[in-house]
Image (tube, rainbow, N blue to C red):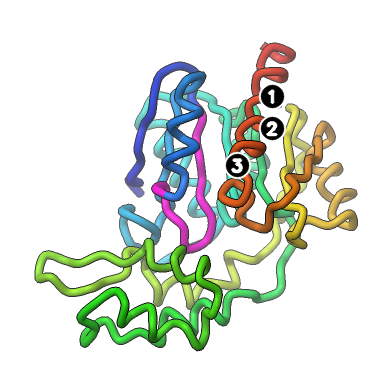
Amino acid sequence: MKLHYTCYGNGFPLIILHGFLGTADNWHSLAQRFQSDFKTIAVDLRNHGRSPHSHYHSIKLMADDITELMNDLSISTANFIGHSMGGKVLMQLCQTRFERVHIPIVVDIAPRAYKPGHQDVFDALMAVNLQTAQTRKEIEQAMIPHAPDFAVRQFLLKNLIRNQQGNFIWKMNLPVLFNHYQEVIAPITVDRPFTNPTLFIKGEFSDYISTSDEPEIMHLFPKAVFKTIPEAGHWVHYDNPDLFYNTVMTFLLQNISDIS
């Protein structure tokens, strides 16, 4: 699949993989900062953003899409940031296309299976009747009973656009993401240790990575380093962007010199 992406700057590539129901645009501000040191490539994963829709959706397929993108851009290896679902895609790449990953930064996700946790989000999105909606405010009001948190609604509304006929549509492929949700929360199953330095970042207020996950992470990533970003939840890069940026840059610059 030919993915949509945005490039920033020049130099050694840094590829950013967004989370579930996110887009490359969520990373625009940080990508602008990373471009001072890296050719930063923010990607829309399949069935998200401006990338093509497909009837199929899985972590493995998304990892294959990234390999295809790297081939198209003549990128043999790259540094990566992967958040949540994008972090699982990154871990899959580390297992099955390990030679394409230089330094991975995995953000607030572990390789294990997760319990379903997005039903309220799906309910909010499906409560909207896009065929009759006239304004964004009307759409947001329909979402409130299922998504009372303002920040969550604003995140979801970033997926809202108008088509050529002027009607509201979702950028993401909502039916497919709903039907294939179990594949998004499934574990990484390949058991091949990735031996380059790897950074796992978690938010202080998030439970996506716990101390009980560390033995499995260390088994798959024996050079893993764990950092917790204070005053941040699951959207670590949004909640505390300055410290997130500094943490990522420190790790990348230190380890590029160590393994170059």
Estimate the spatial distance between the alpha carbons at disc 2 and disc 3, rounded to whole Å. 22 Å
Dot placed on the residue nearer the N-terminal end, 3 or 1: 3
Dot placed on the residue nearer the N-terminal end, 2 or 3: 3
Residue 36 makes an appearance in the image: yes
| Residue for point 43% across, 31% down | 32
Residue 89 makes an appearance in the image: no
In the rendered structure, find residue 29 and report the number of the disc placed on it. Answer: none
Residue 175 coordinates in the image, percent (x, y): 40, 77
Q: Which structural element holds mark 1?
A: helix
Magenta highlight on residue 19: yes
Image quarter of the C terminus? top right
| Residue for point 60% across, 34% down | 245
Q: Amino acid at mark 3?
A: Leu
Magenta highlight on residue 177: no
Estimate the spatial distance between the alpha carbons at disc 1 and disc 2, rounded to whole Å. 5 Å
What's the magenta region? 14-25
Which residue is labeled 2 in the image? 247
Estimate the spatial distance between the alpha carbons at disc 3 and disc 1, rounded to whole Å. 23 Å
In the rendered structure, find residue 93 and report the number of the disc placed on it. Answer: 3
